[in-house]
Amino acid sequence: MNATLQVAQLKQTIGSPAPHIAQLEAVAAEIRRIAIAAIYHATSGHPGGSLSCADILAVLYGTVLNLPTSDNPDVDRDRFVLSKGHAAPALYATWAAYGLMSQAEALTLRKLGSRAQGHPHVLDCPLAESSTGSLGQGFSVAIGMAMGLRLQVRSPRVYALLGDGELQEGEVWEGAMCAAHHGLSNLCAVIDYNKLQSDDRNAAIMGLEPLAQKWRAFGWNTLEINGHDIPGILAAFDTAKNELSLPTVIIAHTTKGKGVGYMEDQPLWHGSVKLTPEQVQQALTALGTETSKIESLINGRG
Amino acid sequence: MAVVEKAAPHLIGTSGDSLREAFGKALVEWSRERPNVVVLDADIAGGTGAHHFRKAQPHRFFQFGIAEQNMMAAAGGMAATGLIPVVTTFAVFCLRAVEQARLSIAYAKRNVKIVASHPGIDTGPDGGSAQALEDMAAFRAIPGMTVISPADAEEMRQATRAILDFDGPVYMRTGRSPSARLFNPAHKFEIGKGQILRDGRDVTIVACGVEVARALEAAELLAVSKVSARVVNMPTIKPIDAQLLAEASAETGCIVTAEDHNIHGGLGGAVAEAIAQTYPCPIEFVGVRDQFGQSGEPEELAEHYGLTAPHIAAAAQRAIARKIGSRQ
């Protein structure tokens, strides 16, 4: 099937859950393909953490976020901040998969003059909502957005996606205290818990466990899910929306490098890797990419 | 010819209000008709003047606890929803969140105002750990960041309005000690503009913050020695008033800068950078000479670190002696 779906089209399918989930799974696969191709063309970038969050991003942009459409261009939009800004390839790929950015532009990742900067920059891409890349900050920005929207009695919800290594930043726990203290139920943080970070496993660098207990102790509505299970992701976002007094954190257990066998659970594929033509071919094949699509992604014409 | 600011020919006296108090009161005054203004505090409102706003507009006052990094970045997020966040804390704690100000505010061009009390050795007895001597340098180096340091309560009142109506990130210093009173309400503060407070031929003293009053005193001391000193109030450190500085250099031939800050990277650095590109002239720098402060009363410390009027006057004499043609 053609996985490039407009958000509005996808939303019309709600009510028929089975194809809905199949479509989201197809989008997630498409996100992974475009992200890998973009990193290949950039000759640097972070594949592992881009692949691990593709399913979460497919669900967020496919069904969760209330974004402007051609039918309703003036909607007071929900905000999504990619606090783990190094997963920018996945963000641009998500936009490309949903028709919010052209695939050709997503493939200009990290090139001089491109809007697809190495880490998201809001002045280039307003949909990024904030400029991120220094860990911890996007989470705080999302907290500020949630506070600002609530003060103005506006309805949008705010979402932030954090990495697990990011949780080692003290600022995250400043923010965790703050959001709970202020009862920001319009805020939902998602943690892409793939258990790896730049140099090694979380557990070897600076252990995070018991992670769910930490968030509960900080006063958050804390959910744990399999971050690659689309129905589970959908259910968690629904639960978060129905929480009326606390901020929600969704701890999404994921596999770094998900979908590309040789990258899965390997710290080597965290970041700034140069993919060979053989490696990108292998990765795209593993991601179930049609031959014609592989050609269009590798020759960069989209 | 030099146009001398008429609103402040001489020192008027002490107002009793510190710059932080003046800021806090101005915030209340100007936020009444600006419903988008919100104030962020890190458990220090009693020290920054923000307590006035907390009392007047409690629903627009946000407590972040002792957590400046989260507060600074959250301000960027609040601005993204159309609010005008005013981040308040001590200058030294702003240094703790410079990177948040860089990425989540300046890089994203967020309309956030960072207002810092307790700058420089004017902070006094809390000692070296609390005396920020690097803040103007750090914030001046951030692209797109406007840096302001008003000299008295009236200028602070006007500057507070100006930064709220200015679209872009601003870092502004207030001050802890009772401030000298320099200006009456006829004074016109404008971002990016300095004013000549006293005209002179032989040297120009460029000052900001607490050093402006000392610069005026220094000009009186120099007059006794038959030296004619121009005094320029330079409340905007970035963007600096390069035109006014070029004229001062061309007309008086040498410059002294005076600031309660490290001599590296603050007002002195900004003046030197501007002058180097227009009319280079000898410059002497009055400020803390690349060291940390210590406990003491502000006036004692000003004497100890060489920031008082006699020190400025001595620097003026050195600058004059370095002028080409004075070296016979």
Image: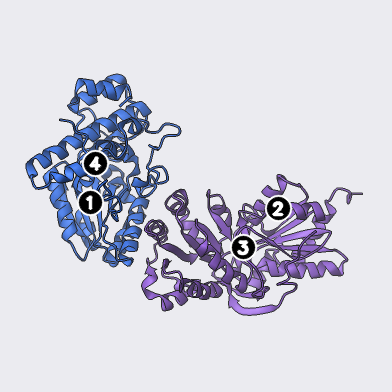
Chain colours: A blue, B purple
- For the residues beneath circles 3 and 4, the answer to whether they share a chain is no
At label 2, the amino acid type is Gln
Chain letter for the residue marked with disc 2 in the picture: B
Helix, strand or loop at mark 3: loop
Q: CA distance from mark 3 to mark 1?
A: 54 Å
Task: Pick the quarter of the image with the N terminus of chain B.
Answer: bottom right
Estimate how packed mark 4 is, as few (under 14), some (14 to 19) or many (20 or more) residues with alpha carbons within 10 Å: many
Asked if A111 appears above or below B146 in the picture, the reply is above
Label ID, residue B190: 3
Q: CA distance from mark 3 to mark 4?
A: 49 Å
Closest to the observer, B306 or A125: A125
Name the residue at 53% across, 71% down: B23
At label 3, the amino acid type is Glu
Q: CA distance from mark 2 to mark 4?
A: 53 Å
Task: Look at mark 4 in the image and give the residue it sits on.
Answer: A53
Helix, strand or loop at mark 2: helix
Name the residue at 13% across, 44% down: A13
Callouts 2 and 4 close, C-beta under 8 Å: no
Side of A241 where B235 appears, left or right: right
Helix, strand or loop at mark 1: loop
Give percent across and percent down for residue B31: 46, 71
Q: Nearer the viewer, mark 1 or mark 4?
A: 4
Label ID, residue B243: 2
